[in-house]
């Protein structure tokens, strides 16, 4: 039998520790081996227990979560999942935590029941234990000049592991890249700070999408997390439309909704499906390919979770299955 994933929970709230523990213990493949209320206790338990994954609160007495995370990464690197509150302060600090080396962020739950359309804590912990995350930290790339008149549109979908994958892909785009639209499965409070992080590190201009935005070369538009889908409308002047609706392929916003809208436009386009659980994006990518678009899927070796791109590949929706480091150059080449 495969040994269970051993998890240490670090949170100053006994109630939250109990809730997180209950969520994790519901998965027979995960064992909660310890709980800590602060960084000092957590450090002692890490040495004593050698956990596979640590879940870490950000706001704690004494040494805060960010400072402790930096110490972990410097002295004893291991997968760390940040469990953060849904506040503006929490969202901004989560971006700092990802920069410091956290594997992923997870919205603090209010009950053991998962929110529909989102990854569960056990799923995120399992992905973290897999250890296939990007380790390269790109330097900020401030160049913005030279946006050209490329006509093609690039549409990207991602889920678990997508934060680091998108940093690598968009970080590899030139400042004059084709207009690019992204759906990344992520809680609502985190997408704005993630867009800021992408904008800081990547040559194109990156922003959180709003209804009515006209797609421009050299710009990347990230769908807001939460209650609305994102699609591209208007073949003559493509623009963003955000709208309410039911979950599609288990998600809102849904990659399938975005990809299908691009397929309907009939414009030159490239679809890219990155790492993620489930099947969201597979049907939409197939429709894009049928409409004449070029399509790319991330390969298994470099995916944190080879779910969405695997389903798309099996369905014949993927023209080119590529390792993550190759995707930016190939996508830009296809769009030329």
Image (cartoon, helix red, strand yellow):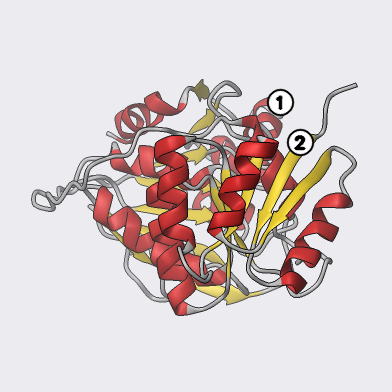
> Which quadrant of the figure has residue 228?
bottom right
147, 189: nearer the viewer: 189
Q: In the picture shown, does residue 219 fall above or below 310?
A: below
Res. 5 mark: 2
The x, y position of residue 273, in whole percent, is 54, 39
Res. 314 mark: 1
Horizontally, residue 324 falls left or right of residue 180, namely right
The x, y position of residue 287, in whole percent, is 61, 42
Please give the name of the residue rendered at 52% of the width and 63% of the height, measured from the top-left corner: 231
> Which quadrant of the figure has residue 328?
top left
Nearer mark to the viewer, of 1 and 2: 2
The local secondary structure at tag 2 comes to strand
Please give the name of the residue rendered at 41% of the width and 33% of the height, measured from the top-left corner: 135
Horizontally, residue 281 falls left or right of residue 77, namely right
176, 80: nearer the viewer: 80
The local secondary structure at tag 1 comes to helix
211, 238: nearer the viewer: 211
């Amino acid at each position: 039998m495969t040994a269970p994933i051993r998890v240490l929970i670090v949170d100053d709230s006994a109630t939250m520790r109990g809730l997180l523990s209950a969520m994790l213990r519901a998965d027979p493949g995960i064992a909660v081996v310890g709980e800590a209320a602060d960084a000092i206790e957590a450090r002692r338990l890490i040495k004593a227990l050698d956990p596979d994954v640590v879940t870490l609160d950000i706001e704690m007495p004494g040494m805060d979560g960010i400072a402790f995370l930096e110490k972990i990464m410097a002295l004893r690197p291991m997968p760390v999942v940040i469990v953060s509150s849904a506040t503006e302060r929490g969202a901004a600090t989560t971006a700092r935590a990802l920069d410091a080396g956290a594997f992923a962020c997870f919205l603090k739950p209010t009950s053991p029941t998962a929110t529909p359309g989102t990854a569960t804590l056990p799923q995120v912990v399992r992905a973290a234990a897999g250890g296939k995350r990007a380790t390269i930290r790109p330097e900020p790339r401030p160049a913005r000049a030279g946006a050209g008149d490329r006509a093609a549109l690039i549409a990207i979908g991602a889920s678990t592991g997508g934060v680091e994958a998108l940093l690598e892909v968009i970080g590899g785009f030139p400042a004059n890249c084709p207009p690019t639209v992204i759906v990344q499965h992520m809680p609502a409070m985190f997408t704005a700070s993630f867009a800021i992080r992408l904008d800081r590190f990547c040559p194109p201009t990156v922003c959180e999408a709003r209804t009515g935005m006209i797609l421009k070369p050299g710009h990347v538009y990230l769908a807001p997390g939460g209650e609305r889908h994102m699609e591209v409308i208007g073949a003559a002047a493509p623009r963003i439309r955000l709208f309410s609706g039911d979950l599609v392929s288990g998600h809102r916003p849904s990659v399938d909704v975005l990809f299908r809208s691009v397929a309907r436009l009939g414009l030159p386009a490239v679809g890219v499906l990155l790492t993620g659980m489930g099947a969201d994006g597979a049907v939409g990518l197939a429709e894009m390919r049928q409409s004449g678009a070029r399509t790319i899927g991330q390969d298994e070796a470099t995916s944190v979770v080879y779910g969405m791109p695997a389903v798309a590949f099996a369905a014949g929706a993927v023209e080119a299955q590529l390792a993550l480091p190759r995707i930016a150059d190939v996508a830009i080449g296809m769009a030329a």
